Amino acid sequence: MHLGLRTKLFIVSVVLILGGGSAAGLWLGAELRDHLEEQARTALTRDARAGRAMVEHAGWPTTTDELDRIADRLGTALDARITIISADGRVLGDSEFDRLGLAEMDSHATRPEVVEALASGEAITSRYSDSLQTEMLYVAVRADPGQSVGVIRAARRLSSVRATVARVRLLLVGAGVILVIVAVLMSALASYLMTRALGRILDAARAVAAGDRSHRIELDGSGELVDMAASFNQILDDLQGTVDQLGEERDQVGAVLEGMNEPVLAIDPNHVITLSNRAAVEFLALNEAPIGQRLADVLPSAAMARLDLEPGPGGSTTAEFERGPHRFLAQATRRRDGRGSVLVLHDITGIRRLEKMRRDFVANVSHELRTPVAVLQANAETLLDGALEEPVMAGRLVEAVHRQTVRLGNLVADLLDISRIEAGQYHLDLETLRVRPLLTTIIETMERPAGARQTTLVLRAVPSLSVTADPKALEQILTNLLDNAIKYSGHGGTVTLRAHTVGDRVRFEVEDDGPGIPLKHHNRLFERFYRVDKGRSRGMGGTGLGLSIVKHLVETMGGRVGYLPAEPQGSIFWLDLPRVAVEEPKTAAG
């Protein structure tokens, strides 16, 4: 049988009340009995002493008649039995017996109270009286030595004391019953009020468990339950704050995950996916998040099979694999709670490309340095071996040394330029430039190398064009492009430098009529040390860094650079820079 909280509280209260009341009644009864007996002993001691004083006041009579009358008067006055006993135990007077009865009474010499009183002066004892056939309480006091009277004894029936105790117990029981009834009623009322308040708290707890965190408990008054309700409301507020904070953190984590470009997958100890971000869904080419699917089913890969998905606490493992044209680095990190791991896929295609470019760069620089250094060493050794004494040979060797030193100087200068540009240490002063005067100056500078190859330079530029650029950088760019065009156009060729508008930008074009560049090389023209015809390029003294420097300088100034094949043959290298609208000055006639 299921008992409710109110019934349980009521039963416990009744048991406690009855148990406590019974224990209190028994204790009070025992205390009352002891107290009344103590009062009786005190009163009898007083009565016995009063009897001794009265006998002494009477001059210690010696006759039985007189002593018996004294005992009768004392018994009537004190409401007690007074007995006067001689030193040898003979009863000389007793308030309960007449003279005939005294003659028939036994000797009291062996009575415990008489023996003790004669020995110590006073004695108190309770025992059964053979003469009165009832339980009695005796107090005996010794008379003065040398008198006919030995002991004066006062006695009272214990039944009167016990009757008083019984009456008091009856009163206590009656009062206890009334108190129990009142206590039971009050307990029932208290149980009802308490269970009603607890019921409201329980209803609120159930509502919170069901998800309603707006529920509040309102109790009037004061007490533990009111404090409990206040504590519950405070806990509820703290819980709501915690839930809100967790929600915000979840949203933040979700925003971070969704904002990451790297695919992220969380897996449990069984390698089942429990969380993924948008990048992972796109990476796996799925329509929805692969929650609940095994990792091996959605990302099959030999490298992934070798990846330890359960590294040690605080550790991580990595593995690389290819997917299409891209290369990825998979990194598995153990969760702090040990329940699974987090897998992040990093696209390292660009990193690996840069590493390859670095290796190629080191290899190209080493190769470019090897040839001039070898020539310089060989020529120097030849000169030391005696070629200095031969004017013709010495001249050719010195000329070769000079040519290779110039080549080395150009290579070092280009390497310094490109390293400063890539490190952001190449300072540019952007300003508004008039295009036509700058191009005219550049054409005049390049006339000498063009004349050496019988190349015709043509300038076609709109006079009113202006751009935002660094004059030295733009001059270096166009000079580099013109120098390449002159070298590859062949003897008697034509190189054209143009400048015209394309939208809000100014386009510069350097066109030659040389053999052109095959299609397979177009995407790599601006890479460092990349050559279309390596043998011919080295023969012309190029470093392989010119076009790379051009690309970096143009992009640093906010422009673009590219290549187009010319018709019917040849090449066009172009670059765009921001155009600046400059008002033309008016002439007098205008």
Image (spheres, grey):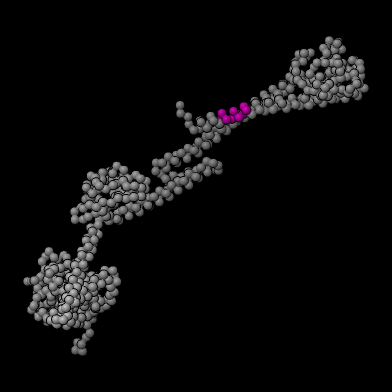
Q: Nearer the viewer, residue 334 or 361?
A: 361
Picture quadrant of residue 39: top right
Prevalent SS, magenta region: helix
Q: Residue at x 39, y 43 (%)?
A: 211
Most distant residue in the left direction: 568
Picture quadrant of residue 204: top left
Q: Residue at x 20, y 70 (%)?
A: 369
Task: Identify the image quadrant of the N terminus.
Answer: top left
Q: Residue at x 42, y 45 (%)?
A: 213
The number of discs equals 0
Q: Nearer the viewer, residue 47 or 494?
A: 494
Q: Position of residue 113 (x, y in %)?
A: 80, 20
Above or below, 317 relative to 90: below
Q: Position of residue 533 (x, y in %)?
A: 12, 68
Residue 206 lies in the magenta-colored region: no
Q: Position of residue 506 (x, y in %)?
A: 19, 74
Picture quadrant of residue 155: top right
The answer to whether residue 168 is visible is: yes
Q: Residue at x 38, y 52 (%)?
A: 248
Most distant residue in the bottom direction: 588
Highlighted range, magenta: 14-23
Task: Identify the image quadrant of the C terminus.
Answer: bottom left
Above or below, 445 relative to 76: below
